Image: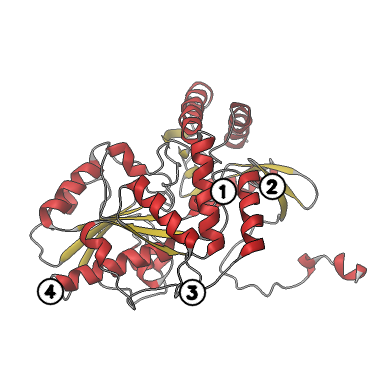
């Protein structure tokens, strides 16, 4: 048994499918904004598991919630009432000004629910070939429906035929949507308030408002995918709240569970009445554990003034970046909304494909999308940690 524990698994072929390219590091524990690997080295996590552990690793309140609920009950079934699920639905609907909630296990599943609602809405209007407008460079998931909704050919390659109802238009171009106003088959517009996987693409300040006006005028459902931009990431609990609007459908995940798998599809008005018994479901969705933890996440947001910290640290990062990094010739632009950060680089000066590994060697965790550095640090990050982050970015782009 002792010999088995000391086997170096790197010498063996993995039994995992090859759909990921994992970096050669394994983390064994985390605390706040830091992760520790098998050799005891600490890394500054500026990615939060791609926007998941918004409250940091091993947050004591979240750990306590997981332990306490696991001692009581993990799973029953949605054929019975689940008190934690009811409580969370009430809180989220109140916070987002929505009417109903459906719980899933991921963001892609939340978006799937939204797409099914759009189809049912189409049938209610006797539209048999519905069209959903989505954005070029947008990302909504990797299931067949959400993959089809995604506006990135690189993730669609090899999976044709895709679902035909999605029409992709340019993001942040209201005229591109408006030209479909006379198309009677259009039933919905599905967008990210900030495009995350594309490298943190932030639209003009009134774009989302103009889209809502078009949706109301044409009786289209307005679907906002806030899987990445939601749960405090931009400085408001929900990104669309910057615009003082309310969509018909709001999709959440990632930071909602701070590491436990949960997604939510919130709806209001007609959209909230589309799902009826038998039309949709999930074996694990909304189980007592994950919904209890998600409620604890909301508690921490309220008790620890997380949104205040997001805005303060966002302003501090932007100020430090502009004073210490912006003048470097390799830097083309800074795109920042809350703690959703994209740094556009000149690919003629630097090979962006090597930056993830270089950052890892300097004990920094980031993501590269195209010619941009994408960072989604924990929302609890401090000024001291931002100072460390700024120094590491300078080192990264000047090597």
Few, some or many residues within 10 Å of mark 3 (<14, 14–19, 20+): few
> How far is disc 1 from disc 4 in space, using C-alphas?
43 Å
Query: Who comes first in sequence, dot 1 or dot 3?
Result: 1
Residue at image coords 48%, 52%: 256
Find residue 228 and report its horizontal and vertical position in percent: 44, 50
- Residue 300, quarter of picture: top right
Q: Are marks 2 and 1 in contact (CB under 8 Å)?
A: yes
Who comes first in sequence, dot 3 or dot 4?
Answer: 4
Task: Report the residue marked by disc 3.
Answer: 283
Tell me if residue 372 comes above or below residue 21 in the rendering: above
> Closest to the observer: 7 or 256?
256
Please indicate whether residue 166 sits to the left or right of residue 383 in the image: left
Occupied quadrant, residue 172: top left
Q: Earlier in the sequence, mark 2 or mark 3?
A: 2
Pick the residue in front: 242 or 385: 242
Residue 36 appears left or right of 145: right
Work out whether mark 2 precedes mark 4 in sequence or the reverse, and give the earlier one.
2
Label placed on residue 53:
1
Q: From this view, report whether residue 267 is shown above or below residue 380.
A: below
**Which disc, if any, is residue 126?**
4
Q: Earlier in the sequence, mark 1 or mark 4?
A: 1
Judge left or right: residue 152 versus residue 355: left
| Residue at image location 50% in from the left, 51% down from the top | 295
Q: Which residue is mark 2?
A: 30
Mark 4, residues whose alpha carbon is within 10 Å: few (<14), some, or many (≥20)? few
Q: Earlier in the sequence, mark 2 or mark 1?
A: 2
Which numbered dot is residue 147?
A: none
Q: Residue 328, how many percent across, how many down?
A: 50, 28
């Amino acid at each position: 048994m002792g010999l088995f524990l000391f086997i170096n698994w790197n010498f063996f072929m993995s039994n995992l499918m090859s759909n990921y390219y994992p970096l050669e590091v394994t983390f064994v524990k985390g605390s706040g904004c830091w992760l520790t690997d098998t050799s005891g080295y600490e890394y500054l996590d500026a990615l939060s598991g791609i926007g998941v552990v918004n409250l940091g690793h091993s947050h004591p309140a979240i750990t306590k919630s997981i332990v306490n609920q696991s001692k009581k009950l993990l799973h029953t079934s949605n054929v019975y009432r689940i008190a934690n699920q009811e409580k969370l639905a009430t809180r989220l609907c109140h916070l987002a000004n929505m009417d109903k909630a459906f719980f899933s296990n991921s963001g892609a599943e939340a978006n799937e629910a939204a797409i099914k609602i759009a189809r049912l809405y189409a049938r209610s209007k006797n539209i048999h070939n519905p069209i959903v407008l989505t954005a070029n460079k947008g990302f909504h998931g990797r299931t067949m429906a959400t993959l089809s909704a995604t506006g990135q050919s690189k993730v669609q390659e090899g999976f044709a035929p895709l679902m035909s109802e999605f029409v992709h238009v340019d993001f942040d171009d209201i005229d591109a949507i408006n030209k479909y106003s006379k198309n009677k088959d259009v039933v919905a517009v599905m967008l990210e308030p900030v495009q995350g996987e594309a490298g943190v693409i932030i639209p003009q300040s009134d774009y989302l408002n103009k889209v809502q006006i078009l949706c109301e005028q044409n009786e289209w459902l307005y679907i906002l995918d806030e899987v990445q931009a939601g749960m405090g990431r931009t400085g408001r609990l929900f990104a669309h709240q910057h615009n003082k609007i309310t969509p018909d459908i709001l999709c959440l995940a990632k930071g909602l569970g701070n590491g436990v798998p949960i997604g939510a599809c919130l709806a209001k008005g007609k959209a909230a009445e589309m799902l009826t018994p038998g039309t949709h479901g999930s074996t694990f969705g909304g189980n007592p554990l994950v919904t209890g933890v998600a409620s604890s996440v909301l508690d921490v947001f309220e008790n620890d003034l997380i949104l205040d910290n997001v805005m303060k640290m966002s302003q501090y990062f932007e100020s430090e970046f502009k004073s210490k990094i912006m003048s470097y010739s390799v830097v083309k632009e800074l795109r920042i909304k809350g703690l959703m950060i994209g740094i556009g680089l000149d690919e003629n000066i630097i090979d962006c494909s090597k930056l993830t590994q270089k950052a890892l060697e300097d004990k920094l965790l980031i993501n590269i999308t195209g010619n941009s550095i994408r960072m989604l640090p924990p929302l609890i990050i401090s000024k001291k940690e931002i100072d460390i982050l700024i120094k590491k970015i300078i080192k990264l782009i000047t090597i």
